[in-house]
Image (cartoon, rainbow, N blue to C red):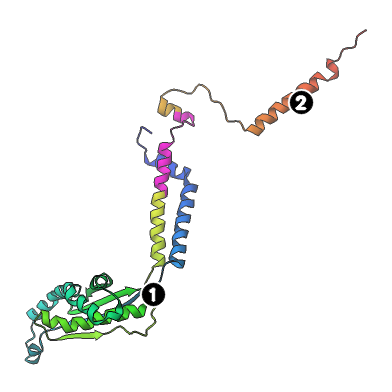
C-alpha cells in the first residue's frame, strides 16, 4: 500500500474486517468480566481520620489566628510523608508483630490524604481481609499519635475515628464496570489495529480498480471466479449432452 489511505478507505477497511473486530472485542471483554468476577479477590478498605492541631498551650490561651491555621494546613503534607517513613512504620512493625508485616510492606499498604485543605488527614488501607486492613490502619494511627510529638513540637494529635474491626462493609474492588469499559476500549483499539495490519500485509490485487490504482494500466479482460461444483456440473452436463447427441437417431445411418 504505497499511497496514503483517506478517511473513506479507512472506513472501508473497518467495514471489511467488521466481523473480526466484533468477535475480538466480545471475546476480550467477556474474558475480562469472567476473570474479574470469578478469579479476582474482593478488596476491602478501612480508614481512620487524624487531626493535628496547635499545642495545648496555644489552645488554652486562645492564640488562634489565620496564619497559624494556614501553617498547620501546610504541615499536613509533611505529616503525610513522615507517616510513611520507618520512624513511624518501623515502630508499628515492632509494637504490632501480629500484623506480620515489615515497615516496607506497611508503606505499600497505607495511603494518606488530606480532606479539602483542612488539618484532617485520612489514613486508608486496602486488603483482601477487611479485619486485617482495619487492624493495620488503627495501629498506624495510634503509633503516629504517639511518635509525632517526638518528631515535631506538637502535643495535640487526635484520632477522630478508628476503623471498626467487626464491620462487614461491601468490597471496594475490583471494579467490574470499570474493568469492562477499559477492556472494551483497549480491545477495540487492538482489533482495529489488527485489521489495518492485515490490510497492509495483503498485497494481492482483487478488483479492476486495484489494477488501475497500483499498476496504472487499464483492464482489458477479467476471468471470473467459478465455483468448483459449478465447473464440475457444467462439464458433466456437456458430456451428457454430447452422449445424447451421439446416441440420437439423427446420428444413426442404416446400411443397404
Foreground pick, 27 / 10: 27
Q: Main secondary structure of the magenta part?
A: helix
Is residue 242 highlighted in magenta? Answer: no
Residue assigned mark 2: 240
Q: Position of residue 192 (x, y in %)?
A: 41, 47
From the viewer's perspective, tell me whether residue 212 is left or right of residue 241.
left
The quadrant the C terminus occupies is top right
Tell me the quarter of the image containing the N terminus.
top left
The reply, left or right, for residue 97 in relation to residue 70 is: right
Q: Which mark is residue 35?
A: none
* In this rendering, position of residue 238 left or right of residue 122: right
Q: Residues within 10 Å of mark 2 (few under 14, many from 20)?
A: few
- Image coordinates for residue 121, horizontal then vertical, percent: 21, 78
The residue lying toward the viewer, choosing from 18 and 93, is 93
Position of residue 197 measured from the top left corner of the image (x, y, whole percent): 40, 41
Q: Position of residue 116 (x, y in %)?
A: 21, 75
Q: CA distance from mark 1 to mark 2?
A: 77 Å
Instruction: Judge left or right: residue 195 versus residue 157.
Output: right
| Quadrant of the rendered image containing residue 49 | bottom left
Q: Which residues are magenta?
A: 191-210
Above or below: residue 139 compared with residue 215 = below
Q: Which residue is mark 1?
A: 171
Q: Tell me if residue 49 can be seen.
A: no
**Mark nearer the viewer, 1 or 2:** 1
Query: Badge 1: few (under 14), some or many (20 or more) residues near its Cα, within 10 Å?
Result: some
| Residue located 46% across and 67% down the image | 38
User: Contact (CB < 8 A) between labels 1 and 2?
Assistant: no
Q: Which residue occupies the foreground of this view, 200 or 44?
A: 44
Earlier sequence position, callout 1 versus callout 2: 1
Which residue: 83% across, 20% down? 248
Residue nearest the observer in this picture, 209 or 254 = 254
Amino acid at each position: 500500500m504505497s499511497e496514503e489511505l483517506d478517511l473513506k478507505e479507512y472506513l472501508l477497511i473497518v467495514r471489511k474486517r467488521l466481523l473480526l473486530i466484533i468477535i475480538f472485542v466480545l471475546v476480550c471483554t467477556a474474558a475480562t468480566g469472567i476473570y474479574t468476577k470469578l478469579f479476582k479477590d474482593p478488596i476491602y478498605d478501612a480508614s481512620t481520620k487524624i487531626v493535628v492541631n496547635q499545642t495545648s498551650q496555644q489552645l488554652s490561651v486562645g492564640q488562634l489566628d489565620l496564619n497559624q491555621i494556614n501553617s498547620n494546613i501546610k504541615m499536613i503534607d509533611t505529616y503525610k510523608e513522615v507517616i510513611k517513613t520507618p520512624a513511624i512504620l518501623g515502630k508499628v512493625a515492632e509494637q504490632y508483630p501480629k500484623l506480620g508485616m515489615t515497615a516496607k510492606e506497611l508503606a505499600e499498604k497505607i495511603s494518606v490524604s488530606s480532606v479539602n485543605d483542612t488539618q484532617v488527614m485520612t489514613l486508608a488501607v486496602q486488603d483482601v481481609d477487611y479485619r486485617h486492613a482495619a487492624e493495620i490502619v488503627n495501629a498506624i494511627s495510634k503509633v503516629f499519635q504517639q511518635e509525632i510529638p517526638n518528631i515535631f513540637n506538637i502535643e495535640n494529635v487526635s484520632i477522630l475515628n478508628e476503623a471498626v474491626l467487626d464491620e462487614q462493609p461491601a468490597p471496594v474492588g475490583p471494579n467490574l464496570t470499570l474493568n469492562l469499559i477499559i477492556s472494551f476500549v483497549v480491545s477495540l483499539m487492538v482489533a482495529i489495529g489488527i485489521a489495518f495490519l492485515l490490510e497492509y500485509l495483503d498485497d494481492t490485487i482483487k478488483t479492476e480498480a486495484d489494477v488501475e490504482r497500483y499498476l496504472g494500466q487499464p483492464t482489458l479482460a477479467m476471468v471470473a471466479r467459478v465455483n468448483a461444483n459449478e465447473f464440475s456440473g457444467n462439464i458433466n452436463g456437456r458430456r451428457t449432452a454430447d452422449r445424447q447427441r451421439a446416441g440420437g437417431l439423427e446420428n444413426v445411418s442404416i446400411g443397404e
